[in-house]
Structure formats: structure tokens, C-alpha cells
Amino acid sequence: MADMQIIARIRSPFAEKFGIPRQSGVVEDVRATVVFEPEYRNPEAVRGLEGFSHIWLIWQFSETVRQTWSPTVRPPRLGGNQRMGVFATRSPFRPNAIGLSSVRLERVEIDRELGPVLHVSGADLMDGTPIFDIKPYLPYTDSHPEATGGFTDGTDMEQLTVDFPHELLERVAPEQRPGLLGVLASDPRPRYQDDPARVYGLTFAGRNVKFTVDGGKLTVLEVE
């Protein structure tokens, strides 16, 4: 089998794994760009893509590549204390560290130096993640309204109330604020952590945001 080629990399606000939305589309206000590698910067390769509202990104869990694998993992949605088969989850710890994300295609830009640049929203990829392929999302075949979610159906994604003091929010670039607020509201903590005194640190768009969570309220303490 021929080796897969990295065709592009994503540029996103996430410099580390902590805080990345658990699935694509969870925080639609997170903006990112897909920048092709030099040998794939041919505008002809994206001809017609602008007609689609969503695309699939096929990518690599580049930070979790390993030589061994486990048949069971601990899904965060179950609090990290129950094991499920790896193929019943989207865990990065798989025989092949490949991820799949459905994102909204905001626009296709043809840059003089970078060639085609895809502006997307709702991405759940760390900055610099290698992308192996891009495919259009087809509503008539990819959407299944009657689908069931297995063990995830009973684990609601509760939203937190975010207390973000105005003077701290002003330290964040205006175009990045909606995405950051969405990430905080979706509760970036691991499910098994629930200490109201613990101070968490989230890196987003070059800013280190420190916060606590007490019950259903997240309070931002500092933006560095």
C-alpha cells in the first residue's frame, strides 16, 4: 500500500489538546483555515468546492501516534471510568491514528503565495494538524436524522454560564471572542474533574485563559 501524503495543515486557535471541542461542529464559532502543502497548491484541485456548505477533513492524530494499541478505551463522555471498544469510540488511541471531522466551509480564498486556502468553522483540530484528504459533505447521503448515538445518547452536552469580565475579554482579539466564549461554555474540562477550587489554563489564539468552574458557572480569572 502506498504511503498517505499530507496534503494540507490546519491553522486553528488551539496550540494544545486541552480545550479543543470534543467533536467537530460543537463550537461553530471557532474559525480556522486549511492551508495546502506547496505541491498541492493548485487552484484546479478545489474547483467546484465553493458550492458545498460543509466538507469532511480526514486527518492524523499527530500528537498520539504510537506503535501499540488497546482494544478498549475510556471515553471522556462516560467520565473516563468505563471502558468501551475502541471502534465504538472516536478516541485518538487507535491502530491507525486517523480522525474525521465535518466542518462548515465559509469560503475558498485563492492566495497569491499560498494558493487555495479554505476558511472553515466548527473545527476540532489542533494548530498544525496534518490533513490527508478533503471531501465534500453530501446531505442526501451523509445525513441520517434517524441515527442513534449509542452510549452517547444519555450524556447530554450541558452548557456552562460564562462570567468573563469585560476588561479581560478586551485582551482577546474581537474576531476570536465568539469562538473562545463557545469553547468555555462547552466545558473544556475532563468529565472526571469537578473541583471548584482548581484553576485551569486554556491556550486559545495565543492567549492563556485561566478559569474556575463551580457548578454550572465558569469564571475567567486572567487572560495572559
Image: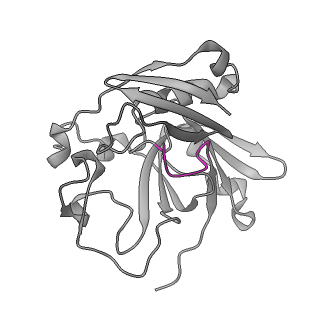
- Toward the viewer: 198 or 13? 198
Image quadrant holding the C terminus, namely: top right
Q: Main secondary structure of the magenta part?
A: loop
Left or right side of 111 for 197: left
Give the magenta range.
12-20
- Toward the viewer: 72 or 141? 72
Measuring from the top left, give residue 210's x and y in whole percent. 55, 33
Whether residue 63 is situated above or below residue 119 in the rendered picture = below
Count how many numbered circles sit on residues in the image. 0
> Residue at the location (56% across, 24% down)?
178
Measuring from the top left, give residue 214's x and y in whole percent. 36, 25
> Residue at the location (48% across, 23% down)?
219
Extreme residue toward the top, this view: 166
User: In terms of image quadrants, where is residue 92?
Assistant: bottom left
Whether residue 67 is situated above or below residue 78 in the rendered picture = below
Extreme residue toward the right, this view: 112
